[in-house]
Structure formats: structure tokens, C-alpha cells
Amino acid sequence: MSTSLQTPIDYLKGVGPSRADLLRKELGIHTYQDLLNLFPNRYLDRTKYFKINQLQANNAEVQIIGKIIKLEEVAQKRGKRLVATFKDDTGVMELVWFRGQKWIRDALKLNTEYVVFGKTNYFNGKFSIPHPDTELLSEHEQNLRSSMQAIYPSTEKLSNRGISNRVMTKIMQNLFLETKGRFAETLSPKLLSELKLITKSEALFNIHFPKNSDLLFKAKYRLKFEELFYIQLQLILKNLIHKSKIKGFPFETVGAHFNTFFKQHLPFELTNAQKRVLKEIRADLGSNAQMNRLLQGDVGSGKTIVALMSMLMALDNGFQACLMAPTEILSVQHYNGLYELCKDLNINIKLLTGSSKTSERKKIHEALENGELDILIGTHAVLEDKVKFKNLGLVVIDEQHRFGVEQRSKLWKKNTSPPHVLVMTATPIPRTLAMSVYGDLDISIIDELPPGRKAIKTVHRYDTNRLKVLRFIRDEIQKGRQAYIVYPLIQESANMDYKDLMDGYESIARDFPMPDYQISIVHGQMKPADKEYEMQRFVKGETNIMVATTVIEVGVNVPNASVMIIESAERFGLSQLHQLRGRVGRGAEQSFCILMTSHKLSENSKTRIQTMVNTNDGFEIAEVDLRLRGPGDIMGTQQSGILNLRIADIVKDNDILQHARYHAKKILTSDPSLQAPEHAVILETYRQMAKYKNIWNYIS
């Protein structure tokens, strides 16, 4: 009988209840399947054995055969350490344990041949290995060994409790012996032969016990392809199911609202990219399926006009529309902008936020329900159950990554059928990530700026050049421009940062004295009303300089501001720097972004600063950011659920990802419900995954 991979880990030889408990808590290993999917971090060449007199003071990982001739406990400042004298025929060294001494002492045998393995330390003319892996030579020679030794992920707790890498390897061997190394195939014969992939069983054996580096490479490729293939399959399937099952409201006419605005009130000629995106949206809205589209465009690329024109299509078909933004400041700004654009169109447009007065709310609720209100703009307040529409046809969500999945689905329930959804983001998402995280949305990209926009000039200056920078700000203010000076504010060091901000403000106030200059200051500890007042003074041009923490990151629109100074720029992430830079360059004048740093910069900081100076392209910046930070950080927690990858890395394995998506698409195009006999194994694997894995039931 074959062993079920869903067997609890407690039953595996060499594990037992207390080890099982540790493996569950520390590594999330509950079943045989989880253990099988605990892939090694790296591999070591275990064909080479060193002699003690060959060791060098270079912290290398070495393997030595010898005997323990003495064991003693040595007192130290706190507690004791266990020291073993280890000897081979060329010399003597020490093995040291600072934790788990009792357990280790009982397990070791004196004057018996051991193979020890670990990192060497050299101190006071003597070599030692702290916390080595120890294995009796007699056992070492019998093991399922390969020339390349797998090193598994571990934690301090596991090492303290004696679950060393050797123990993990032994447990893994027991798993392969018990299952006879036979595992169900998960890819179709056609895919295996077309892509020349090794079988699942071969791949799993060679990932844990590689016979040679060529087989290890093949094993990794096969397992990465499979992982990415099933993620893509799931996303594409979800999109297909969505389109076939979730009927949308077809917007059949492009009528008076849209045409009047397009012909008479459009403030500027649309770019080709905007026209292309509008075409894609129109095709979606005209079909019978619900639109689910992600609109990506850099800061200032004109997403708002596209959103408005999509909303006008809804109005032309007798529907209402709604735009939701993550912050009050941003929703007010959207409201003001759209109100201005619609004022000659006879459209009823209102704003609903947390600070809307009760009397105002009541009016809005009534006008929404009886259909007098055409467009509602607001924050999370829009999601409240009290907010009912007569006929909601389109929802636009700005800066989507700030809203969770649950919040999006609340909007769906605001009509009998779900309204069409357009998700907008100014945070460029690298293509690789978009394919993995938003693969179930259709993606539109606005990749050109409106004509007349000049690229922002970005320079890097050290703190020692501060006087020149101040002179430059004075010159720009002289020309009638305004400047931002931004300080970092990071939660862990909030008090220090706040002090830096206030010190900065005071020194700027000395350099730019009243009455010649006026300065606004905005930071997180201010009351919302005070913040709004200071912001408005800057927006109206009453102040020349805005000193702020990153609260200005999203959405403030001041066309007259042409200088952005970012203090301690090395402390910001790339996407943050790019978002901040996007606050200037909104008018017709040349704008500048100056990144101030100290001379001490890490390699990563240098790369970030250099990237900012070299390019204004948000997508290029996002790719670098992804390489530096990895996917989890970029997507934030709500989205990273899907990227719970065990072996693939969507940055380094981009080629495999493209490949996997291509094949998943090809299979689903010819056989959308995977009913063909040749796809039986894929369908079965997909069903099994849906049963046991959280990744598949993730997303709205």
C-alpha cells in the first residue's frame, strides 16, 4: 500500500511527538507532504575530508574524520559551554556547544570514529567548530549519501533542541524509504516530453539527494516550472470562470455625456496610450461579462481622465458610478478635479468621507437611492451598509493595494449583479509580479506622459553641499515656484525622526526668514484639520516651502511646485522615492528632485539612489525594487498570500514564469475545463491542491 502524503508527521520514523511539535511550530511542517516540500537552501560538497593540519583561518565549512578523546564543561560569564577535544592523526582541535549541552553530552561516545562537519573558528592559535554536525563514521558510510549535501532551513530553537541538519537529513531519508521514493506525477505526459522535464519522483529525489549538479539543475527546473504553472493555471482559470459566470451589465451605448465631454470639454488631447486603454475598457463594458481591469500608469500619466470617461459611459447607460480612494486628502482632490471637469455637463457629483456632516450624509444617501446622484466619490465611508445605490454600474478603486479583498467584495454587493470594476494604481508593478498577483485581472498600462510634460531632473547631493542646494531653492522661489522638503518618518524611530523634522524646520525657518518667505509644515502628529489648513496654504501658493514627512506621498497636486528635496534619501525605499518625486513636475516648468544623503551609504542605498538619478520610468524602477526587496515586501500582506512560493523565485525565475504562463494559457485555450483525457492528471492535481492548499482559495 502506498503511503499517503497527508499522514501527520508524528508517524514518521525518527520524528515522534515532541519533534513533530517543534517541526509544526518552527517550520510549519504538519504532514509528509510538507516535509517533502521543505526544499534545501543550498548544497555543500561532502566528497572532501580535511585533516586538522590542513585547516586555514577562513571560516570555511569543513568535514573531518577523527575521535573525541575528552569532554568537559567550561564556566563562562553566563552559564557553561561544553568543549570536546577532537583528534585525528595530524592534530587536535575543539568542538564547542553553547546550548543543549546535556542532550549532546549524553549522545556522544568517546574514542569512537566520528565525521564532524561545520564552520571553523580560529582563536588564540587554536581551531574550533561551534555546534558541529556529528555522525558516527559507521553510520555515515551507510547513508543515502550524495556528493552534494543538502542544507535545510532551520531556526535557533531547532538547533537548541538537537534537530541539526544531520537529523533533518536523516528524517528526510526515512520519508524516502517509507514512500519508496515513488510520488504521483502532476504534469501531463505531453508537457513532460515537450519540455524534456524529468519525472516528479526523480525531481524530488534529486532536490534532496542530488546525484550530481546536472540532475540538481533539472530537478530545480522541473519543480519551479510546476509550481509556477499551477499558480498561472489558477489565475487564468479564475479569469475565465469570472468572465463566463459573472455577468456584467452590458453598456451598449456611448451617448451624450461621453460624446459631449470628449468633443467639447476635454482639457487636452488624449495621448495614444490613453486612447488605447479607453478602447480596452469600452470593449469590456460592452461585453456581457463583468469588467475586472487593472489600470497602471505612472504619476501624472492621466489615469483620472480615463476613469472619468469610463464613468460617463456608465451614466450614458442609465447607471451610477463610484470612485473610492484610500485617504481623505486624495478623495477630496479627486472630487475637486472631477467636479471642475464636469461642471458644464449637468452631472450630479458628491463627496462622502469620514468627516462628512450627518445632514450632508443624509442628503447623499437619499439622492443615491432615488438615482438623482450620478457619481459618488469617497473613502472607506462608501462601503458602509447604509450607502445604497439605485443602480451602481461601475466602481473605480484608486491605489488598490491599500484596500483588502474583503473591502472590494463589499462594493460588489451594492447591486443585483456586481458592478464593473476598474482598479487604478500609480505604483508601477513589475510585469513579473503583475502576472503572478494580478493574473486574474486584465491589465491596461498608460505608458506615456501627456505632451508638454518635461521629465523631472533628479540629482544626488551629499549633506556637505547643503549651502548650494539652499541657494538653488532661493533661486526657484525667486522665479515664483514652490518647494517641498521631505523628511523620513519610520515607525521604529518615530521620536528621533520627529526631532529631525523639527530641527530641520527650525534651520529652514532661519535660512528662509519671514516676512520674505512663508513655510508650511505637515506631519503625522498634527490634527487632520491643521494638516488640511497647512496643505491648503501651500496649494493656494500662500507658502513657498512645504516641510513634511511622507504624508504627502499620495496625491497632492500642486502644479506650481517645482523642487522636491528628499532628506536622508538613503532611508527611503525606491517606490517611495519615485512616488515622492511624482509630486513635482505637474506643471509646464522644468522640475527638480534633489536626493540628500550622508556619505555613508550601503550598496543597496547606492543602487537605489543611482536608479533614481538614471531613470524616470516607474516600471524600470519597480523591476530594480523587486530585485532588491523581493515580492512579499512590495505587495504588502493582502496580496502576498498568493506568492507563498516554496521553490520558485519570481524575480530570478522570470523566464520559467513566462514559460509556465504560456503553457497554462495554451492548455486552457484548447481545453478550458480540462476535460480532455490527456489533461486528466492536471485536473486531478489542481483539485488536490484546492483541497489542501490555502493558496488556491485565496483572492476575492
Image (cartoon, rainbow, N blue to C red):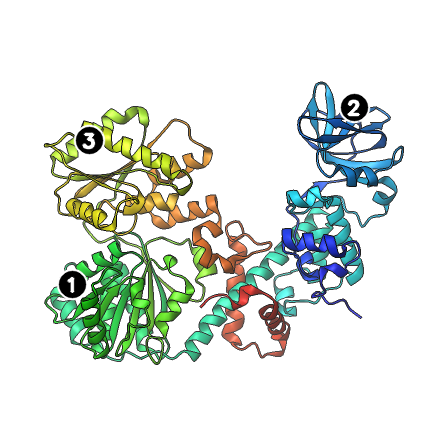
Residue drawn 23% across and 26% down? 468
Q: Nearer the viewer, mark 1 or mark 3?
A: 3
Q: Residue 487: x, y in percent? A: 31, 37
Q: Quadrant of the N terminus?
A: bottom right
Question: Which residue is the site of mark 3?
Answer: 509
Q: Is residue 291 visible?
A: no
Q: Residue 315: x, y in percent? A: 21, 75
Splitting the image into 4 quarters, where does residue 130 fall?
A: top right
Q: How busy is the neighbourhood of tag 3: few (under 14 within 10 Å), some, or many (20 plus)?
A: some
Answer left or right for 579 relative to 189: left
The amino acid marked with disc number 1 is: Tyr
The amino acid marked with disc number 2 is: Asn
Residue drawn 29% across and 46% down? 551
Q: Residue 523: x, y in percent? A: 28, 43
Disc 3 on helix, strand or loop? helix
Question: Which residue is the site of mark 2?
Answer: 53
The amino acid marked with disc number 3 is: Ala
Answer left or right for 17 relative to 498: right
Of marks 1 and 3, which one's residue comes earlier in the chain?
A: 1
Q: Is residue 187 above or below residue 46?
A: below
Q: Residue furthest right?
A: 111
Question: Which residue is the site of mark 1?
Answer: 339
Tell me the CA gap for discs 2 and 3: 68 Å
